[in-house]
Amino acid sequence: MRQTRRTANPAGSLDHPTRPAPPFRALPRPEAFLIRGESQARIRLSSSGRRWAIYLGREGTPDALDNYIRALSLWRARGYVWDDAVHAAFKAGEEAPRPGPAPAAAPDGPTLAAVVAAFLDWSRDTYRKGGKQTGTYPMDRSAMAALLATPGLAATPAAAVGARELAAFRRRLEGQTKPDDPARPRGERVSRYTAGTINRYLGRARYMLRWAASEGHVPGAADDVLPSRAGRRGRPGGPEIRAGAVRAPADRRSVVCVRRALRASGEHVAVAAMIALQQRSAMRPAEVCLMRPELVVPADLPGVHVYVPDAAADKVARAGERPTPVLLGPRCWRALRPWLDEAKGDGRPYVFDPRPWSRRPGRALPHYAPDRYAKIIAARCEALGVPRFSPYQLRHAGATRLERRPDVSLEDVMRQLRHTSARTTLGYIDPSIDERLAFAARHC
C-alpha cells in the first residue's frame, strides 16, 4: 500500500555543489510516497492531455536530486511540454542543454521549441503587475503547449515556420472534439475549443514569431503569410467550432434573490453589499474585492466620494501609471458606508473581510479573492434555483442600467466605466427586445 505526503523538496536541497538548479519560478511541487517500506520521490505534470508521474528515486538521495533537475530541464527545453518522447528521453537518461538568454544555434537556426522556451521566459518576466503575474503568461503557456503538440512542429527550425505550419496548428485546434455529450444528437461533433480560444492561440503564435524576429532569433515574417482567424463553421467534414459564451448583464431577479438570501442567512453578508456596490457603480470585481479604507476619500462635490483602486486591481493600468479613479455617488455610499466605518474602527486592511465567515480565520486572506467571490455567488444561485451570474456580469448590468436612463448619454456611461473607446462601452450594454421593437416601429 502506498502512502503519499507532500514535502517541500523530497529530492533533497536544491543547493547542489556541482549542478545548481535551473532558473525556474513555477516548479511542479514534488511529493514523497512509501512503497515497500522505502520513501520514494516523484513529481506530477499535466501535459499533452495526460497526467504524468515522473519517478525520481529514493527520497533525499543525490540521484533523486539529479533526476529532479534533469526532468525540469527537459520539460523546459521542450517548451514546457511532456509527452511520450520526452518521457522516453528522461528514462533513457538524456540530458537537456542548459537554458541561456537566447536559443541555442543550430545549423538551420534554432528550433521552434527553443524559441518558444525563450519566449515563455520573456513572457514570464514581462507580464507582471504590482509584483504579481498577470493572466497573459498562463495563456501563453497554454497556446505554446498546443503549438508544440502539433506533429512535427517542435523540431522544425523556427525560421521555417510560416503559413503552412500555422495553418496545420489551426486545423489541429479545430479538429479536436469534446467528449460525447448525451444532450447532443448522436454522431454530432463539436470542437473542444471555441472560436475565440482558437483565435487567441493563433494570435499569440503570431506574436511569438514577431518577438523572435525582433530579438534576432529568426528572420522577420510578413503578416500576410500567416493564417487568418478561425471561422464559425470550421472546415468541411470537421467538427463545428463552438462560439464563445456572450457575457450578458446579470439577471435582475437573480441579483435580488441572492442579496436577500445572503442577508437572511447571515453568512458572507459582505458579499451582498459587494453585489449592490458593484451593480450601482459598475466597478470591476477585483476593484471591489481589494478596496481599502484609505483609498476612499470625499470629493469636492457633496455626496460624492472618489475611490482610486490599487494598481493590482486595475487591469488596464500600465506600469508606473496611476489607476483611473471610480466616482461613488450617494446610492453607492449608502451601500459602502457601514462596511467602511466598520473596517476603519476595527483597523482592518480591507473593507470587505471574509474572515468572520471562514472556517479557518487564521489562514484566510483578509480580503475576498475574485474567484472566491464568484464561487459564493454561483453556489447561492444554484441553491436558490435562479439563473447564475458572474461578478463581471454585474458590471454589464450597471452599464445597461445607466444607459437606459433618459438623462444619461453614451459618453457618460463610457466615463463611468473608465473606457477609452465608445466601441468597448457598447459591448457592455444589452439592448432589450422592447427597445429594439420600439426602434423598429419608429424608424424601420
Image (cartoon, helix red, strand yellow):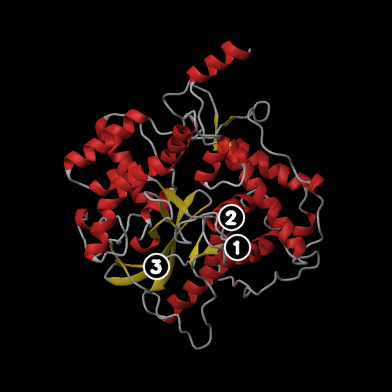
Q: Amino acid at mark 2?
A: Asp
Give the labeled residue for mark 3. Answer: 30
Residue 3, given in percent of the width and then of the height, sits at: 27, 63
Quarter occupied by residue 199: top right
> Of 122 and 295, which appears nearest the observer?
295
Give the labeled residue for mark 2. Answer: 140
Name the residue rendered at 33%, 34% in the picture. 255
Residue 261 at least partly seen? yes
Q: Is residue 224 above or below residue 296?
A: above
Q: Amino acid at mark 1?
A: Ser
Residue 252, given in percent of the width and then of the height, sits at: 36, 30
Q: CA distance from mark 2 to mark 3?
A: 24 Å
Quarter occupied by residue 366: bottom left
Disc number lying in front (2 or 3): 2
Looking at the figure, which quarter contains the N terminus?
bottom left
> Of 125 and 84, which appears nearest the observer?
125
Name the residue rendered at 81%, 64% in the picture. 108
Side (left or right) of 264 relative to 115: left
Q: Amino acid at mark 3?
A: Pro
Residue 283, given in percent of the width and then of the height, sits at: 44, 47
Q: Are marks 2 and 1 in contact (CB under 8 Å)?
A: yes
Q: Secondary structure at mark 2?
A: helix
Give the labeled residue for mark 1. Answer: 123
Mark 1 vs mark 3: which is more N-terminal? 3
Mark number for residue 139? none
| Category of crowding for the residue at label 3, using alpha-carbon neighbours closer than 10 angstroms: few (below 14), some (14–19), many (at least 20) | many
